[in-house]
């Protein structure tokens, strides 16, 4: 992947876009904002098709093959090392939620819900990894009533 400043695209659009003929994607660096990616429509469609096909196969495998589910429970720490801090039943719950969400987002075309599931479970693993934090968050305590909105 090649990188150029966003200003190059603004100042020399033809030269900058021509670089796409030599590289797959072009990262447009912006100083005060998130970088952008410039790619061809065909390349973006190929990436989308790849993700879609992979997701469909993965979800179908998980839904129809008990051995695949068991194997995934054994190998998931390779993809998500932080699951080692989760109890086994939480790892199973994570997989169920992940597969369900993958299946649902296939219809939406947005990866945001999958990223949210992974982020939430990673935070859960962080709590399990810290015995002091886990103790504080899991101890029984009385309810102190509604929390007032911030001012």
Image (cartoon, grey):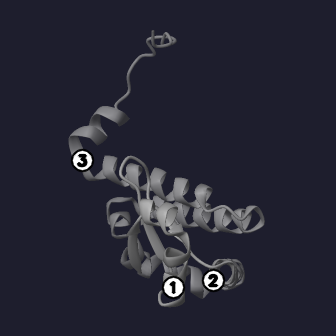
Q: Considering the image in quadrants, where does the N terminus appear?
A: bottom left
Disc number lying in front (3 or 1) = 1
For the residue labelled by badge 3, is the local secondary structure a helix, a strand or a loop?
loop
Q: Residue at x 30, y 41 (%)?
A: 134
The mark that comes first in sequence, 3 or 1, is: 1
29 sits left or right of 39 in the view: left
Label pair 1/2, CB-CB below 8 angstroms: yes
The mark that comes first in sequence, 3 or 2, is: 2
Q: What residue is disc 2 on?
A: 43
Dot 2 alpha-carbon crowd within 10 angstroms: few under 14, some 14 to 19, many 20 or more = few
Question: Marks 3 and 2, Cα distance to the nearest angstrom?
Answer: 43 Å
Q: What residue is disc 1 on?
A: 24
In this orientation, which residue lies closer to the viewer: 24 or 50? Answer: 24
**Residue 13 image offset from top left, x and y in percent:** 54, 69
**Residue 122 image offset from top left, x and y in percent:** 40, 56
The mark that comes first in sequence, 1 or 2, is: 1
Q: Quadrant of residue 46?
A: bottom right
In this orientation, which residue lies closer to the viewer: 1 or 123? Answer: 1
- Work out whether 86 lies above or below 19: above
> In the image, which disc is placed on residue 130?
3
Q: Considering the image in quadrants, where does the C terminus appear?
A: top left
């Amino acid at each position: 992947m090649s990188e150029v400043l966003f200003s190059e695209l603004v100042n020399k659009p033809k030269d900058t876009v021509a670089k796409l003929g030599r590289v797959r994607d072009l990262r447009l660096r912006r100083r005060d904002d998130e970088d952008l990616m410039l790619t061809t429509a065909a390349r973006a469609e190929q990436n989308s098709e790849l993700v879609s096909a992979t997701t469909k196969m993965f979800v179908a495998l998980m839904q129809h093959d008990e051995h695949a589910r068991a194997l995934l429970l054994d190998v998931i720490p390779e993809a998500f090392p932080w699951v080692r801090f989760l109890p086994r039943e939480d790892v199973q719950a994570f997989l169920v939620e992940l597969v369900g969400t993958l299946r649902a987002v296939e219809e939406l075309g947005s990866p945001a819900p999958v990223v949210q599931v992974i982020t939430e479970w990673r935070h859960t693993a962080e709590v399990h990894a810290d015995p002091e934090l886990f103790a504080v968050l899991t101890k029984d305590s009385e309810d102190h009533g509604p929390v007032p909105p911030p001012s």
